[in-house]
Amino acid sequence: MGNPFSVNASLIGLNHFYILTGAAGPRGIMGLKGDPGESISSPEVTVSPVTQTVTENQTATFYCSATGNPRPAVTWSKVNESLGEKLLSTSDGRLEIANLSYSDTGKYVCEAISALGQDQKITSLVVEGGSLLLFWWFWIKSNEMMQSL
């Protein structure tokens, strides 16, 4: 019977360092497979409502939802203009414009940015003059009264 500790290998020596070389041994037992990680994806934006018509002196609210991994940062801006002081943009993607005036009419953009890219959607706001509508109603009524005389 041979030596149970014998190995079919070569001994290579270099400056008092030795390396034992030989055939690879049998493969070990595989470990348990881990849970899969989350898939990465570029940002994707959804806005609601796409268009909103509001009477002046009222409040308009838009919502922006952004998906993606890593989680994108969401910002609102007015197209070709800066956001005024009366605008509230929250970290949950809500844009609130209080005490509306006709000058708030325009397009607003929600943008989501992450390391994997960016996406944006545009919304439209139309502010109707409440005083102009009231004037128009009185003008029509006064014309109706004049015609009945």
Image (cartoon, rainbow, N blue to C red):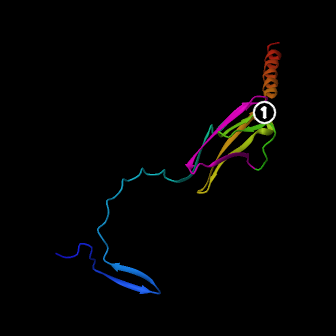
Task: Give the main secondary structure, helix, strand or loop, of the magenta stretch.
Answer: strand
Task: Residue 55: name its quadrant.
Answer: top right
On the image, the x and y values in percent for residue 22 come to 32, 79
On the image, the x and y values in percent for residue 96 come to 72, 35
Q: Amino acid at mark 1?
A: Leu
Residue segment shown in magenta: 52-79
Give the side of residue 8 with respect to residue 16, left or right: left
Using the image, determine if residue 33 lies above or below residue 3: above
73 inside magenta stretch: yes
Task: Identify the residue at horizontal 69%, vertical 34% (top origin).
Answer: 61
Residue 70 vs residue 45, the one in the foreground? 70
Q: Which residue does the numbered mark 1 point to in the structure image?
A: 100
Task: Identify the residue at horizontal 79%, vertical 25% (top origin).
Answer: 136
Using the image, determine if residue 23 lies above or below residue 30: below
Task: Identify the residue at horizontal 71%, vertical 33% (top origin).
Answer: 60
Q: Quadrant of the N terminus?
A: bottom left
On the image, the x and y values in percent for residue 46 come to 59, 43
Q: Quadrant of the C terminus?
A: top right
